[in-house]
Amino acid sequence: MRRGPGGLGRAQGVVALLATAEKTTLITPYGGTLVDLMVPEGERAELRAYANTLPSVRISERAVCDLELLATGAFSPLDRFMGQADHQSVLDTMRLTNGYLFPMPIPLPVDEDTAAQFKIGQDVALRSPANELLAIMNVEEMYEWDLEEVAQKAFGTLDLRHPIVAEMHNWGKYNLSGPMRVLQLPTHYDFKSLRFTPRQTRAMLEGFGHHNVIAFQTRNPLHRVHEELTKRATQEKDGVLLLHPVVGMTKPGDVDHFTRVRTYKALAQRYYDPDRILLSLLPLAMRMGGPREALWHAIIRRNHGANHLIVGRDHAGPGNDSNGKPFYGPYDAQQMVEQYEEELGVTAVPFQMLVYLPDEDRYEEVTKVAKETKTASISGTQVREQYLQNGKQLPEWFTRPEVAEILAETYPPRYRQGVCVWFTGLHNAGKSTTAGVLTTLLQEFGRNVTLLDGDVVRTHFSEGLGFSKEDRDDHVRRIGFVASEIVRHGGIVVAAAASPYRATRNEVRNTIGQENYIEVYVDTPLEICEQRDTKGLYARARRGEIVGFTGIDDPYEAPQHPEITIETLSHTPEDNARMVLNMLIEQGFVRTEAPGLRDN
């Protein structure tokens, strides 16, 4: 069979290779065999008709990703969303109750109202957020879970700057578990020729004729240093590279998978030996769980046929916490995989720090370079701030021209990127007034601005929501959703909403992306807010006529680490608006000189 570049054009050979996959030279799946939850094709029509008579659960995007990988065996030997015993065992010991390593909890959370509808032993239909029928589950277990326990044990933190910890605050408080009959995998319309199940991936890798398979986990574009590293690892192990990018859910603010896959295709087709690389997409919902996640990635890659995994510095790290410190140590993930590699059968290949030697036009490990040798390197921060955000082309020694061009198309200069400025504070703190002034100032500098005032938004698309915690959270999430779409398309959003709950604000931050979000805390004392209240709402709340009023009988959780804090006693709304404007200018979201006067 002739191999297409990077695995492209290989799909026709999958069926033939599957027939010989029993006599494999690859490492066996974890647990011995691949889990397969797919209903045979001949039985699907009857089961679909039955499923349409059942009560349904619309599961989250994250659960859809998990379901797909459970169904195809990527999570082998796990064959369902975790029951209570497995869930607790994984939190406490990183093992399933059968003793197999499994460091990441895989729950199916539902809210209390949903759980109350079901009985143990009942069949339910699992559907995607778009109502696509995916599977039938027999409910064997419904159990409560503890958010703080899961956050602390699985992710080592309660900090809301950790994206999965913030997200968990929005999960239902009960988990469902039971055997599943999967009727269809989630529909994917993009990059169909690169989407392979573990069984298909193993069959295609078999065709290369190498025992060693080196998997490379990535959620970022590949630059020359990654290319060099993967080629060296493949050569040293005399194997084949499984370039296995995550295209499910990654860290909020990451480069979208459409852009990333375009760069991977360009590299695989033009710069790798076609007999040494398979590009296959992984619909994984990452947890950004650092060391535990790295071990989980090793299990997943073993199930796809890999016996080596390149483990990067700060592998699957979510960045910095609320105090500006990394959540995990830079080499914690490598050490975790190395600790279990003998038991797991997957060897960690450490990501070596490479630098470019311009005088020799090659890359070398930094530990092998003499101090006096001239070197060149560009950090991820420099890529964003000095090149992409300024519209400068990345140098060819750093990244291939095809990759640089794709990134430039997707990431315009900073002054053309979107950003959300989120004002939070008590009622009558001065949020709306300052936000209105800022909106005017930004238009002076030629930016397209959308003002989302909490009271106005409530009138237009939060009508019907009350002032319970749940309704307030939904109100804030709606503003956040609209803001994220505007930011994604390059606009500036100025949002002004009390948004009293810290977890929900952090959820919005993560939805929009850390680098394109500025939280402004309007720090006005409660007694001043009450004095300004011409509508008398505070007074009515004091008398008990209004229940659940923020700052009176319902809490306001002030930001712990806002990007900027303003006060309205000694500063006018214009003073404060200009403070925020200056921050936007400093960060490059607003340019002060006319376009024609910019240096070339």
Image (cartoon, grey):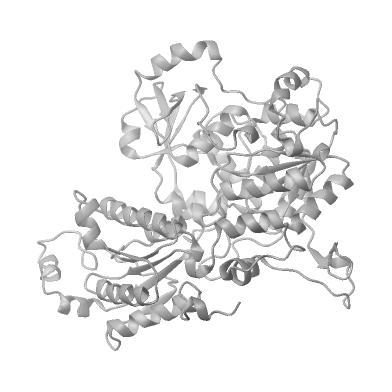
Work out whether residue 220 can be spotted: yes
- 578 or 558, which is in the foreground? 578
Q: Position of residue 143 (x, y in %)?
A: 42, 36
Q: At which x and y percent is residue 437?
A: 29, 77
Q: In which quarter of the image is residue 579?
A: bottom left
Residue lying farthest to the bottom in this orientation: 570
Where 185 sits versus 479, above or below?
above
Q: Quadrant of the N terminus?
A: top right
* Residue 272 appears left or right of 299: right
Residue extending farthest to the front is: 596
User: Looking at the rendering, which quadrant does residue 524 occupy?
Assistant: bottom left
In the picture shown, does residue 69 fall above or below 524? above
Give the camera-side residue of 56 and 155: 56
The residue drawn where x is 48% and y is 26% is: 178
Q: With 109 as the anchor, is 193 left or right in this view?
A: right
Q: Is residue 38 left or right of residue 544?
A: right
Q: Residue at x 14, y 65 (%)?
A: 541
Q: Where is residue 585 in the image (x, y as percent from the top left)?
A: 46, 78
